[in-house]
Amino acid sequence: STINGRFGTVNHTPIVYIHRGIPGDELAALYARADCCLVTPLVDGMNLVAKEFLVAKDREVEHAVPGTVVLSEFAGATQEMFDALVINPYNVEATADAIHLGLELTKGNGVDKQLRWEVSERMRQSVLANDAVWWAAANLKDLQEDPSIGRCLEPTKGPTSMLGVFAKDFSSKQEGRKAIFLNMDGSFKDPSRESSESFQQQLEALCTRPDLYICIISGLTKDFLQKQFGHLENLTLVAEHGIFVRYAGQPHWKEMCFDDSTAWIQKVTPLMQLFQRCTPGAQLDVRKASVAWYYHECDEQYGTFKTKELVHQLALSTGNLPCEVCQGDKVIEVKSLRVSNGFAVKKLVSDEDKKGNKFNPIMVISDDSTDNSIFKFLPKDRAYMVRVGMGETNARHRFLDWNEAEQYLNIIVDDDPLGMENSSESLLERFQTCMGDGNTAVEDIDLNDVEDDQPEAKIGSQIFPPSPVLDPLGRRQD
C-alpha cells in the first residue's frame, strides 16, 4: 500500500495483489506477458514458480515476451538456473538493483531483442530437459547399475604405497645429488595457518644434507612462504606457481616466470569478490598471476552449492581469456596459463642439469589435486611422483596422509634406508603387492597369516605402532 500510494495514479497501480487462486491458463498467460519474475523466499526447497515462469516463455506463442528471473539464493532452483539474477533477499538494496537490471535486460533499450530472448531461452531449455521424467529415469538407472562397476579403482592400476620403499635411493651413501620437491598447499587450506613444528624440524635436518636439494613449491604468496620457511637458508622456495623464487643460499626473491597477460585478473576478481560476500566464511586471495577462493570455513553443503555456481560463472567469463579454472581441496583458483608448478619444477631441474648437477633420483610429494602437471613434466626414469591423500592422480605412488609422508621423510632424515628395523618386512612386501605391483594377483594373497604381535618400530626419536593389517584394496582391517 505504501508503494501504491506513493507511485500510483488513476490509470496505473504499480502492485496488483491477487489474494485468490488463478486458473492455470490465465496464470500461464500472465507468465508469458511478464517481463521479470521475482522469487525471494528466505527458506525453500525447489520453488517451481520460477520454472513455471520460464516454461511459459515460449517464443512461438503469440504476444509472449522474453523475461528474466530474480531468484533468491536460498531457493533450490538456483542450482539449475545459472542465468538467473541470484540475490540475497535480506539485502534490500541488492534486490532492488537486481529488479532494475532484470527489467533493463528485457525492456531496456540497451539490449537487442534477440539477446533478450537468448537469456530466457537458455534457462527454459534447461528446465524442459531436466524435468521430473528425466529425474526419475536417471535415479532408476543408477539403482539398476551394478555398484561394483566403476566405483573403485582396480588395485593393479592404482598408485602403490611409497611407505618403506625406495628410501635407500636417497641415502647419503648413494652417489649423486638427490632432489625432493614438496607441495603442502592442501594442508594449508587456510592461508594463515602455520606449518607444524615437527615438519619444520624435518626440513632443517634435510637441508643440512649436502647431497639433497630441497624445494617447497606452492601457489601461495612469497610473503607467506617467507614467514614460514624463510629462516632455512638452504631451502629453495617457489611461490605463486612459479612466479617468484628464492634460491637456496640467496636471501632475496626473484621473478622466475614473467607473465604480462594478467589483465584477466581485473575481470574475474569482482565476480569472485561477489561470491565471497554472498558466502559466509569464504576467503579471497588475489595474487600476481592467480586468484584463489577458499571455502574451507563455510557450511559444507552451502559451500559446495556456491562452488558449483562459481565454477559455472567463471567458465562463462573466462572462455577466451589466457587463464584456467582449477578446483582443489575446498579452493577454486583461476590462474594464468603461462605459469604452473609443473613449469617451475621443470625449469629448476633443467637449470641444474645445465650446470652439471643432474638430480638422480627426484621425488615430488604433493597434496594438491591440481598438481598433475608436475607429474607429467618430470622424467619417469629418475623421478618418484607421490600424491598425499586420496583422489585421482597421475602420480605412481601415494601416501595416505602427511603423517605417513613425514614418517617416510624421517627415514631419509635418519639416513637409514632400512627404516623400520624391527618391523615386519613381510608385511611391507605384502602391502606393496596388494596395492598393485602388476606381478601378483590380489586374490592369491592371504593376509590372515600376518603376525599380530609385531613390535613397535622406532624411527629417529619417534615411536610408531606396528604397520596396520590391510585388505586387498589397501584399507585397514581394524
Image (cartoon, grey):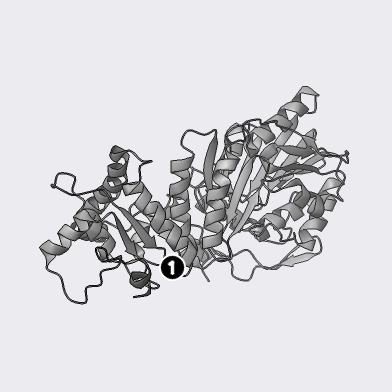
Report x, y in % for residue 101.
41, 52
Identify whether 339 is placed above or below 464.
above
Q: Is residue 52 visible?
A: yes
Residue 301 image offset from top left, x and y in percent? 46, 66
- Residue placed farthest to the front in the image? 10
Q: Which residue is mark 1?
A: 89
Q: Check the picture and name the quadrant holding the N terminus.
A: bottom left
Which picture quadrant has residue 50? bottom left
Q: Locate residue 103, reporting x and y percent.
A: 35, 52
* Vertical placement of residue 38 versus 234, above or below: below
Element carrying mark 1: loop
How far across and down, in percent of the image, does residue 32 sit? 20, 54
Q: Nearer the viewer, residue 301 or 366?
A: 301
Residue drawn 19% across the image and 45% down it: 59
Residue type for callout 1: Pro
Question: Would residue 112 appear left or right of 471 to someone viewing this image?
Answer: left
Q: Residue at x 25, y 61 (%)?
A: 143
Residue at horizontal 21%, vertical 58%? Answer: 31
In the picture shown, does residue 417 fall above or below 31? above
The picture quadrant where one finds residue 46 is: bottom left
**Mark 1 neighbour class, 10 Å CA radius: few under 14, some 14 to 19, many 20 or more:** some
